[in-house]
Image (tube, coloured by chain):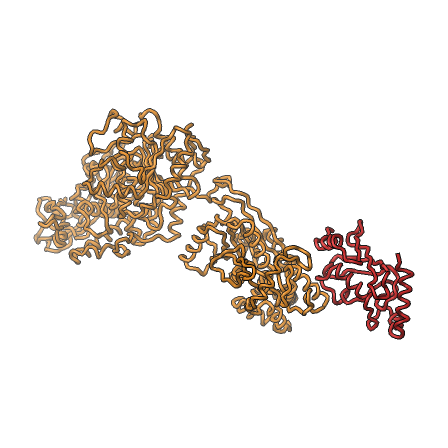
Amino acid sequence: MPEERYIGAFGVTGWATRSGSDLLKHAERVGIERTKTQPTTKRGRGGKIVSVSSKRQDVVVRFTNPRGEEVGRLENEAAAWVSTLLDQQICKFEGTCVFAPDRVRTNDTIYLQLRCFMLKVAFDSGGFIKPSESNRQAGIFETKETQDERNLRLRQVALVKLFDEINLHPSKVNSTTEKHKRQGLLQAAEVAEQYEKQGATQGTKPQSGDGSSTPPSDDAEEGEELEQDQLDTLYKKAQSFDFDTPEAEPPETFAMELRKYQKQALYWMMGKEKDEKAEHKQMSMHPLWEEYIWPTKDVDDNDLPEVTDQPTFYVNPYSGELSLSFPVQEQNCLGGILADEMGLGKTIEMLSLIHSHGLESESSDPLNGASVLDLPRLPRNSSSVEPAPRTTLVVAPMSLLAQWQSEAEKASKSGTLKVMVYYGTDKKVDLQQLCCEANAANAPNVLITSYGVVLSEFNQVAANGGNRATHGGLFSLDYFRVILDEAHFIKNRQSKTAKACYEINATHRWVLTGTPIVNRLEDLFSLVHFLRVEPWSNFSFWKTFITVPFESKDFIRALDVVQTVLEPLVLRRTKDMKTPDGEALVPLPPRIIEIDRLELSSAERDVYDHIFTRAKRTFNANVEAGTVMRSYTTIFAQILRLRQSCCHPVLTRNKNIVADEEEAAEAADAANGLADDMDLQTLIARFTADEEDANNFGAHVLTQIQSEKNDECPICSEEPMNEQAVTGCWHSACKQCLLDYIEHQRGKGEVPRCFNCREPINSRDVFEVIRHDHINEPDSPTIFRSDASSGTQSPSISLRRISCNQSAKIDGLVTHLKRLRREDPGAKSVIFSQFTSFLDLIEPALTRDRVRFLRFDGTMQQKQRAAVLSEFTNRKKGVVLLLSLRAGGVGLNLTCAKRVFMMDPWWSFAVEAQAIDRVHRMGQESEVKVVRFIVSGSIEEKMLKIQDRKKFIASSLGMMSDVEKKLQRLEDIKELLS
Amino acid sequence: MALPKRIIKETERLMAEPVPGITAVPHEENLRYFDVTVDGPSQSPYEGGTFKLELFLPDDYPMTPPKVRFLTKIYHPNIDRLGRICLDVLKSNWSPALQIRTILLSIQALLGAPNPDDPLANDVAQRWKEDQNAAIQTAREWTAQYAKV
C-alpha cells in the first residue's frame, strides 16, 4: 500500500476567521490542518482530566489558501470528526474551494470540497486496540473512561461519519449485525458522551451516574435482567446443533459407552482444545468487521492509481480498527462452554475428553509448548508457578465432589486414571510437588475440589501478597486443563469466588453449565472472562458492544452480538432435540395410554340427559329455521355444558360459563318455548347440597364402626370389607355393596332401607370410613384416635359422606390414586383438565382422601409457579400436581412424575399429547402410564371418534378459513348430538 | 358365570356347621341349586316329619332373595299346594344381610307358628281359623303320610 490512498470526497462548509479580498478563489487548493496537534486531553496536576472548555477548542480544524495563509475553520460538526481523523493519523485531507465570496468578511461561509486519503500508518498499527488492560470492575460509567477509551470512541464516531459523508458502503458485512451496526455504534458513543457530560456537570459524583438500573447495593448484580423470550431466542440460536458433526471415539482407557451425541461433543471439544487452525476452519469474516472496496475513480471521475492485490480494506467500526488483510473469525481460547441440558451427561462427556487428550504418555503436545521446552525439573523456587502437564483440575460445588470422583472412576478402566479429591483433610499435600512435571508419572490426572476451597486458598494467596506458591496450594500450578462444573456459580463477576476462579492458571479452560445465562447477559461475561476469550473477556469491550446497546433497549443488536460470541464457544443440546430423522437424542421409556371408561351415576346421567336433550332440541330447531350459523355460540355453549356435565354436574353451573351462556341461551329458549331449566336446577341441587361435617358423631359410634372393620361384608362376604361404608343407622358393608343395594331398591321403586335394620336410608347419609393407618401425614387432622379399652393405639378413622354427589370421574381418579398410593407410595402424578373449575372440585376430594396435591394454573404469578414446580420436583414422597391443560406453558418439565391423568378430552389429541409430553420427555426414566377418563355413552366418546378423524387438527393448524372451520365444527356437532 | 364369593362361603359354612334339623346340599352341576331338608319343629303338628325343599339362588342374589319351595306336600296356611311359601323375608322384607341359613331357619319357624291371617292356601287358612284342632290334626296326618322318611 502506498503511503496514502484516496478514499472519497465530500463537501463541507467553513467560516472565515478573517476579512480581506481575494483570500480564496473557486477551485483553488486549500490546505487542511490542525493548528497544532494538541493532546485531546491532558492530565491536570491531580491526575484529573481536563475541563470541558478545553476539549471544545480541541476540534478546531483550520484551512489555508495556497499561499499558506489561514482563511478560516471548518464548521464545528465536521471539525469534530475531521480533527480526530487528523489527530489519530488515520486520514489526510486535501481541500478545494467550491465557493468563496470575492471579499471575505469574518464569519462568512465558505464552501469547500475535501478529498480524503487513508494513511498507510493507520493500517499498520495492527492488532486489537485494547481499550484498557485492566478489567475494570464496577458499574458501567462509574469511573471516567480512560484516555484510550476516549480515543477509541472518537475514532469510531469519526470513521462512521466519514464513510457516511463520502457515501462509502461496506461491500461485505455480517448480515445479522448489519442493520444495527452503525446506528448502535453511534448510539453507544453518544450515550458515553452524555454520561461524560453528566459526570462533568456533577463534578466528582460518578457513582450516581452509573447508568444501570440496578441499585448500588453490595450484592446487586449489574445489568438488566433478560426477559424469558429474549433468553429463549438466545438459546434457540445457540442450540442450532449440527447433527452431522463428526464423532470421535474415546480411547481404550475409557470404560463407558458414549451415545452418538456424546461422541460428537467429544469431537467438538477436542477440536476446541487442539485449535487446529488449518483444519476445519471456516474462513468467515469476523462478524464485527466490514469489508470496503477501494474506489477506482475519484470524485471527478478520474482514474485512480491501481494498487495490485489490494482491492479491499477492512474496518471494524466497533474498535475503529483498520486492516488490509481479511479478518478471520477466530477463537483463541482453548476450551469453551459445554452447556448441554441437565441429564445429557456433561460429566461423562468431559471425562471422555480427559481420556482423549492429555493422558498421552509422551508430553509431546505442541500446545504445551512452554512446558515441553523446559526439561522436567523440580520446582525452581518456592514462589514460582509450576506446570502440571497431566492434571485436570475440576472445580465443583461441594455436594458434587463425591459424584465426580465416582463418575471418574466408573468411566475409567482401572489404573488408567488417577483421581484425587482435594478437600478438607485431604488438602494436607503439596500439590506443587505432586503435580509438577517431574512427578508427572505419579501426578493425579483429575484433581477435584470445591469452589469453597478455591476461594479460601485465593484469600490465603492474596493475604500473602500474591505469592501463589504458598504451601503448594491450588494456585501454585498451571494445569493442563481446568473445568468449572455448575459454572453459574461464578456468574457474578464481582463475587470473590468468580475472581478466585479467574486466577486459576490452565492451558485448557472449560465451563460446564446447563444455564450459561441465568438471567443477565453479564452472566455470560463472567464465563467468557474465565475462559479468556479475546476480546470479549475485556469488560470495556463487552460493555460497549453488549451492555450499552442492551440497556439502551437495542435488544436485537445486543443479542446478535452475544450470539456471535456464543456460537463458536458453546455446545448446547437439549433433551427435546430431535435428530433429523425425528429420533430423540436419548430414547425414552415407553408411554402407555389407557382409556378408563366410566359410567355416570344415575343422578349424573339425569343431568347429562337433560342437557343433552336440550342441546339437541336447540340444534334441531336452529337447523329447521336455518339459523345454525347465527346461533353457533349458543349451540357451542351447550356442547360445552354437556362436556362439563361429564366431569361434574356442578360445573355446568359455573358462574362464568353460565353468565356467558345464559344470555345466549335465554333468547333461544324463549323462542322454543322452553321453560327456565328448573328441572336442571333440581337435578343439580343434589350435587350441591352442602357437605356438613360427617364427623360430628359420638366416639362410641366410631368405636363400634371401627370394631366392625375386620368383619365380613354382610352382602358379599368379603372379609375384611372392601372400603367399609356405613349407613346413617351405623351398619357397615362394603361401599360398593351398599351403594349397589341402594341402587337396586331404587330401581324397584322402593325406598332404600338398611340391609340390617330396615331403617329407611337417606341416600345422603351414607358414609365412607376413612382410615388413617397408613397415611401418616402430620398435617392431617385427627378426627378419632385410639381405642382405650384395647390398650393399644389403634388407627384412627373418620367418616366421609359418600352420598351420590361425587362425580364418576372424581371417584375414578381417587380410586386410581389410592391404588397408586398403595402400590407405589413415592410415585408422583400429574392431573390435567381443561376446566380449572373442575380442578377446584377435585381438590376437596383429594383433601378428603389425604392425597397430597399441588396446583398450577394460569392465574398464578411466575414466582408462585416456580415454587410449585420446585416443590413438586423436590418432594421426596408421592404428590399430585393439578394442572390446567392450557397453563402448562412451554418447556414445563415434569419428568419426576410417572402417571398422567387426563380428566377430559380435548378436540384434538395433539393438545393432550403435548400435555402428556411434559411428563414423557427427556429425563423421564420410568415408564409413563397415562389414564384418560372418558364417560361411556356420552359426548366424550364421540369426541374420541372425532379426534381419530383428525378434523380438528386441520382446523387448529389454520388450514381452514373461519367459515370453513365453523362449518366443519357444525358437522361435528351434528355427529356429537346424534 | 363364576360363583360369587358369598355363595361359596355360605355353602362352606352350611357344610361345616350345619344347623340342627336343617340340611342344604348344592347340586353338583349347579351350585346355585340346593336340595334342602327341614325337620318339623317339636311341639308342632309337623314334629317328626322331614320336609324336602328346593332352593335356588338367582343371579342377582343377594340383592334379591333366594327362591324356595316345598317339595314335600304339607298342610299349612302359608304354604300352597305347589309348595310356595308366604314369608315376608322371602319377599318385601328380604335383605342382603340374610342368608340361606337364616332363611331356612325362618321357614322352620314358620312351621312352628302358622299365620292364617296372611294366608297363601286359603282353604287351609279358613279351616285353621274355623277349627284349629281339626286343621292341626290334618297337618299331623299329612306329616305322617308324606314327611316320614
- Horizontally, residue B28 falls left or right of residue A290, namely right
The answer to whether A967 is drawn above or below residue A81 in the figure is: below
x, y (%) of residue A913?
A: 54, 50
x, y (%) of residue B86?
A: 81, 67
Residue located 39% across and 28% down the image: A415
Chain letter, orange in picture: A
- Horizontally, residue A657 falls left or right of residue A444, namely right
Residue located 29% across and 29% down the image: A368
**Front one among A970 and A917:** A917
Q: Quadrant of the N terminus of chain A?
A: top left
The answer to whether A35 is drawn above or below residue A763 in the figure is: above
State how many labels appear: 0
**Front one among A95 and B10:** B10
**Residue A101 visible somewhere in the drawing:** no
Residue located 70% across and 62% down the image: B97
Chain letter, red in picture: B
The answer to whether B98 is drawn above or below residue B116 in the figure is: above
- Horizontally, residue A795 falls left or right of residue A468, namely right
Residue A280's image quarter?
A: top left
x, y (%) of residue A299?
A: 23, 43
The answer to whether A924 is drawn above or below residue B81 in the figure is: above
